[in-house]
Image (cartoon, coloured by chain):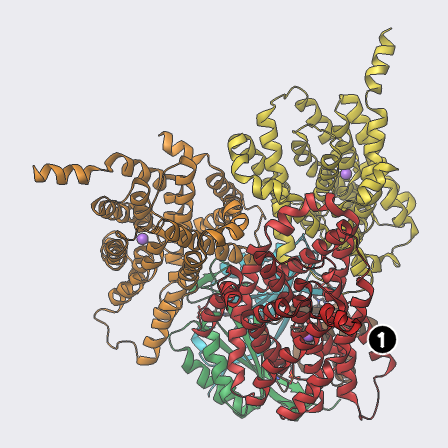
Chain colours: A green, B brown, C cyan, D red, E yellow, F orange
Amino acid sequence: MHTYKRKRLEIVVEKRRAPAILEYLDGEPAITGWTMLPCIGGRGHTGTRLPEGATDALDTVLILVVTTEEVAHRTMAAVLDLLEEFVGVVLMSDVEVARPAHF
Amino acid sequence: MHTYKRKRLEIVVEKRRAPAILEYLDGEPAITGWTMLPCIGGRGHTGTRLPEGATDALDTVLILVVTTEEVAHRTMAAVLDLLEEFVGVVLMSDVEVARPAHF
Amino acid sequence: MHTYKRKRLEIVVEKRRAPAILEYLDGEPAITGWTMLPCIGGRGHTGTRLPEGATDALDTVLILVVTTEEVAHRTMAAVLDLLEEFVGVVLMSDVEVARPAHF
Amino acid sequence: MDVAAANLLSPPVLCFLLGLVAGIVRSDLEIPEAVARALAVYLIFSIGFKGGVELANNGDLGALVPLLLVAAALSLLLPVPAFVLLRLLANVNRIDAGAIAAHYGSVSIVTYVAATSFLQSRGIAYEGFMTAVVAVMETPAILTGLLLARAGQRGALDSRRRWELAHEIFANGSVVLLLGSFAIGFVTGAEGMRRLAPVVTNGFTGLLCFFLLDMGLLVARRFAGFRTMGAGLVLFGVLMPLVGASAGLTAGLFLGLSVGGTALLATLAGSASYIAVPAAMRLALPRANPSLSLSLALGITFPFNLVLGIPLYVAVAERFSGWWEVWRAYLQT
Amino acid sequence: MDVAAANLLSPPVLCFLLGLVAGIVRSDLEIPEAVARALAVYLIFSIGFKGGVELANNGDLGALVPLLLVAAALSLLLPVPAFVLLRLLANVNRIDAGAIAAHYGSVSIVTYVAATSFLQSRGIAYEGFMTAVVAVMETPAILTGLLLARAGQRGALDSRRRWELAHEIFANGSVVLLLGSFAIGFVTGAEGMRRLAPVVTNGFTGLLCFFLLDMGLLVARRFAGFRTMGAGLVLFGVLMPLVGASAGLTAGLFLGLSVGGTALLATLAGSASYIAVPAAMRLALPRANPSLSLSLALGITFPFNLVLGIPLYVAVAERFSGWWEVWRAYLQT
Amino acid sequence: MDVAAANLLSPPVLCFLLGLVAGIVRSDLEIPEAVARALAVYLIFSIGFKGGVELANNGDLGALVPLLLVAAALSLLLPVPAFVLLRLLANVNRIDAGAIAAHYGSVSIVTYVAATSFLQSRGIAYEGFMTAVVAVMETPAILTGLLLARAGQRGALDSRRRWELAHEIFANGSVVLLLGSFAIGFVTGAEGMRRLAPVVTNGFTGLLCFFLLDMGLLVARRFAGFRTMGAGLVLFGVLMPLVGASAGLTAGLFLGLSVGGTALLATLAGSASYIAVPAAMRLALPRANPSLSLSLALGITFPFNLVLGIPLYVAVAERFSGWWEVWRAYLQT
Ligand SMILES: Nc1ncnc2c1ncn2[C@@H]1O[C@H](COP(=O)(O)O)[C@@H](O)[C@H]1O
Ligand SMILES: Nc1ncnc2c1ncn2[C@@H]1O[C@H](COP(=O)(O)O)[C@@H](O)[C@H]1O
Ligand SMILES: Nc1ncnc2c1ncn2[C@@H]1O[C@H](COP(=O)(O)O)[C@@H](O)[C@H]1O
Ligand code: NA
Ligand code: NA
Ligand code: NA
C-alpha cells in the first residue's frame, strides 16, 4: 500500500486547558482533524497526578493531531505558546497515511 | 538493548464499527495482538464529536496494532476497505520491539 | 521550530502491575515524567481481554515515557525484566521535542 | 396557562433549565458519561417495568392491538412529512434529510418519561400499556428514513449491511431493555412491584431530575452549532413536533384513548429520538452528519417539548377528549 | 418444582435472563463498567452491613466459631477435587487447573446475595452471621490453588512475590469491604440501620436487578468462548458446583444450621469467585489464562447456580434439615 | 467526649475510617471516579435543594443578609492568616502559599454535609439558609489567595486570563449547582420535597457513606506525600482549621445564630475546599503545585475536621451559645 509522510503531534494538557488548544486547532484551516484521549495519571515537573475522586481539577488529556510537516512545526510552536506557564508537553513524530487528502 | 523494527498501526473508528475491525484482525494469523484505547472526542471530515451523555452512538476508539512491515501494509489496505464509507482514519509508523517473536 | 530527538516508550501492562513499573520509573532520576492512559481491551499471547464488568482484574493501561535514547534502552530492558512472566509489551519509537531540558 | 406553569415549575423541568443555564454560562458542571448512561438504563427499565405491572393488574387489552398498529403506522409515516419539510425549509442533502426524518418518526423516551411524570403530578390517568407503544414506535421510522435517503441511489445495501442494519433495529439496546423490562413487570406483577418499588417508583422523580440536569448541559453545548445551521432548520425543529403531535392527538382521540393516553401519544409522535436512532444511523447511513440530527433532536425539539410541548399537548387533549364520541353519536343520530 | 419456579420468576433472575438474551442477540445494551463496579461495592457493603447489624441484634455467637473453621476448611480443601476433576475431565495444564481450582474453592458474592434475596422472598430465615462465612471463605482457596499449580515446579515464589501475594490476599478489596462493613454494622447496630436502611435495604433488590442485568450481558459474551473450550470443561462447570454444594450441605447439616443457613453454605461452597480470585491470580499465577477461569466461573457456574442451583440447594436443605438430629437421636437409642 | 464518640461511631465517619484503613493497607478497593463525581453532584444538589425548601417553609430571612455579608468577609479574610502561617511555619514559596491560602478561605462542602448529618442525628437544629452561606463562602477566597500570590510580581494577569478567571469563579460547577438547587428547592417548596424526598432525603446518609468511603481511600493515598512535606506544613493543616473555626464561632455567636448554625459556620470557616478551589487554581495559578494544596486540604484538614473538628465545634457552640446575649444584657445593665 502506498503511503504518504505526515507528522503526528501529541499534546498532553490539563483537561481544563484543552478547550483553548482545540479552539486553536479548529481555527487553523490547514488542520483537518484531531483525536482526544483521556489520561489516568501522569508525572512531570509539576509533580505526580493520579485520579482524585470527586474533583477533576487535575485530569489530563492527550490530543493527537496528524498534519503536514510544515503545519506541524507551526502548530507545535503555537501550542507551546498557548501553554504559557500551564502544564503540558508537546511531542512530534513521523507517521504515514494512505489517503493524503485527508490530513 | 537490541531492538527489531516493526510497524505500528493506529486505527481510529467509531466504537460500533470496532467489532468488525477486530474480527478482521483476529482472523489474520500474522497479527499477534492489538490494544484498544477509548477516545473522548475528535474532529474530522464528518464534524466534531464530543461526549454525548446518554448515547454512545458517536463514541470512537483507537486500535493499536504492532506487526511486521509487510503485514502492516496489507492490514492498512484491508482496514481502509472495511471502513468503506464509515468514519475513521488509519495511521502507520515505525516502532522498535525487543522480543521479535512477540509481534 | 527547532526540535530535538528523543525516544518514546510505550508500555502496555495489567493495571495491577502498573504500580511496580511506575515505582521503577520514579526511582530512575534520568526519567523526567510519564503519562498513563487507560485501555479498554486487548489481545496478545494470553488471549483476548474485554471489559469485565464488576471486576477490574484484567484491566490494562498504556504508560508513555519520553526520554533520551540511552535511558530509553536501559529502561526498556529494566521494564521487560520487571514484567517477568507477567503480561505486557514494550514499544520504542522516535520522537521530537521542542524543549530538550524537559525530557 | 396553569398547566404550562405547573410543568415549568416542576423539579424535573427546573433541573433541565438549571443544566441549560449552567451550560450556557459554560460552567464546568458535569455528570460523568458513565452515570448518565446508567441513568438512561434506569429510566427505560423503570417505565418498562411499571408499564408491565400495570398491564398485569388491569388487563384490559382490548384497545391494545389497534393502538399498536396505529402507533407503528405513525412511526413509519411521520418521516415523510419530516423529509418534505426539511427539503422545503432547509438546504439539507438527501442523506441528512433521511437521517433526520428517521429521528422524528421515532420517539424520545425521556420526553415520554417527563410527560408521564407531569401527568402523575397532575393526577391525570393514562393507559398502562402506553409503554408498549413507546417500544413499537422506536424503530419503524428507521426504515422509512433509510428509504428516503437512498431513494434513487444506485446500489441498495449489500446483504451483509442489510443484515447488520436489521440487527441494529431489532437488537437496539433501548428496544430490548424496554420490552424486556415490560415483560418482567408483566410476569412478576404486584409482587415484583412490591420488591422493586423503592428503586423504580420512589426514586424515579429524583433520578429523572439528575438525568434532565445532564440533558440541559448537553442541549446548551448544542446551541453553539445553531449559528451554522440556519433558520430553516431551527424552524423545522419546532414545526415538526407540532406536526407529529397533531397526528398523535388525532390518532389518540380517534382511538378513544383517555386524556392522559392521548397526550402521551401526541408527545411520542411529536418527539424525536436521540438514543436509539442515532446509534442505528451510524450503521444505516454512516455518511449522514450526526451533529446535524442530534443538534435538532436534542438541541431544539427536546427542550421545546419539555418546556412548552408537553403542557400544550395535555391541554389540547383535555379540551378535545370525548369529541370523537360526541361526533360519532352525532353521526348516528 | 415450586421452589424452582419461584426462583426463576423473581425479578433478579429475570433481569439476569434479560441480560443474557440481550447479550446473545448481540444487543448494544450496556451498563457502563464504572457503574457495574460501584454496584458491586454497594452489594458487598450492604450484605456486610446488614450481617453486622443482625449479629449485634441477636448476638448468639455460640455456633459461629466452629462454622467459621469449617467454612475455611471447605475453601481450603475444595480446590483439590476441583483440580483432580479438571485434570481428569479436560486437557487443562497444571497452572490453569490450579488457577481454576482456586476460583471454585472461593465464593461468588453475587450468587450468595441472590440466594439471600431468594430466601427472604420465601420467608426462610438464616443465621445473621453467614456474611462472616462469606468473608472467611474468600481467600484460603487461593493458597491451595497456588500450591497445586506450583507443585513439582522448580523455584518457589521469591520473597518479594510472596509478600505481594500475601498482601493481595488479605488486602483484597472485597474482603476488606465485607469485613469493614460487617464491623460498621456491628458497631452501629439498630441505630445505624435506621439511618442506612433506605439505601442498604429498601434499594437492595432493585439495584441487584441492575447488577444481574449486567451479569447476564457478560455471561453471554463468555458463551462465544465455549466453542474452543471443549465439553470436558463445560461438564466441569456444572459438576463442580454440585460437588461443592454437597460438601456445603453436609457441613451445614452437621453443624446444625437452620434450613436457610444450610442452603447458603451449600451455595457458597458450590459457587466460584469472579471478583476476588481473578484479581489475586494476576499476581499469583500471571501465566494462567484468565479467560479460561472467568469463562467457567462466570459463563457456566454462575448462571447454573443462579437459575438451577439455588432452588435445588434450598429444596435439599429443606428436605434434609433435622436429619442430623434424628440420626444422632437414633444413634443414642 | 460524648459528642466526640457519637460522631466517631456514626456510619459516615466509620465509612471514612474504613476507606482510610483500606487505603493504608493498599487494598485494591476502589470507587470508580465517575461514580465518585456523580455522588458529589448528588450531595451538593441535595443540600442545596433541602436548604431552599427549608427557606421556603420558614421564611425568616431577617438574619440572612448580615450573615451572608459576614460569611463573605470570612472567606475573603481567612486566606490572610493562612498565608502568614504558611510563610512562618513552612518553607512554602509565595505562589504555593497563595494557592493554599485560597483553599482554606473557601469551604469543604463534604465537611459541611458531614456536620449537618451529625447535627441531625443529634437532633440539633440549625438555620435552613446555612446552605446559602456555603455558596457565598466558596469563591471570595480565590481572589485573596491570588492577590497574595501575585503581590509584588511584575505583570498582572492579562485581560484574557482575568476574564477566564472571573468566569471560573462565577461559573464554577459546584457554585452553580448549589445555587441552582437552592433556587429549585425554594421555588418548588413542600410539593417539590414530597417528590424528591426519597432521593435527596432518604438516600442521603447511605450515599454520603459511600462518598466518604472514597474520601478515606483518597486521603490514605495522600499520606504518602507527607514524608516530603515537612512538619511545618502538617502543623499548618491542623492549626489553620482551628483558626478558621474560631473566627467562624465568634461570628456565629455574634450574629446570634442557633447552636447548630454557629457550629456549621465554624465548620465552614475551619474547612478547606478541594472541589471548587483546586479547579480555579489551575487557571489562576497554574504554576502552583496542586499536590501540595490537595495533600493539606484533603490529607490533613479534612480528616481532622471530620473526626475531631466537627464534634469539637458543636461542643464549643453548645457551651458558648447565648453568651453574646448574656454579655449584651450585662452591658446594658
Ligand atoms: N517525560 C515525559 N514522558 C511522558 N509524559 C510526560 C513527560 N513529562 C511530562 N509528561 C506528561 O505531561 C504532564 C505535564 O508535565 P509537566 O508540565 O512537566 O508537569 C505530566 O503530568 C505527564 O502526563
Ligand atoms: N487529522 C487528524 N488527526 C487526528 N485525528 C483525526 C484526524 N482526522 C480525523 N481524525 C480522527 O478520526 C475521526 C474520524 O475522522 P473523519 O472520518 O475524517 O470524520 C475523527 O473524529 C478523529 O477522531
Ligand atoms: N501485536 C500487538 N499489538 C498491539 N498490542 C499488543 C500486541 N500484542 C500484545 N499487545 C497488548 O499487550 C497485552 C498483553 O499481551 P500478551 O502478554 O501477549 O498477552 C495485550 O492484551 C495487548 O493489549
Ligand atoms: Na416522533
Ligand atoms: Na466455592
Ligand atoms: Na475555610
Q: Which residue is mark 1?
A: D163
Quick one: F89 or E328, which is closer to the camera?
E328
> How many other residues sit within 10 Å of disc 1, few (<14), some (14-19) or many (≥20)?
few
> Seen from this angle, which residue lies furthest left?
F333
Q: Callout 1: residue from which chain?
A: D
Q: Residue placed at 25% from the left, 60% from the top?
A: F76
Q: Tag 1, which secondary structure?
A: helix
Q: Residue placed at 87% from the left, 44% from the top?
A: E238
Label 1 residue near ligand 2, CB within 8 Å = no
Q: Quadrant of the N terminus of chain E?
A: top right
Q: Is residue E207 left or right of residue E100?
A: left
Quick one: D79 or F5, which is closer to the camera?
D79
Q: How many dots with numbers?
A: 1
**Residue E300: percent from the left, percent from the top?**
83, 49
**Residue F289: percent from the left, percent from the top?**
38, 63
**Residue F227: percent from the left, percent from the top?**
40, 49
Q: Is residue F230 above or below residue F175?
A: above
Answer with the quarter of the image where residue F91 lies: bottom left
Q: Residue placed at 76% from the left, 85% from the top?
A: B84
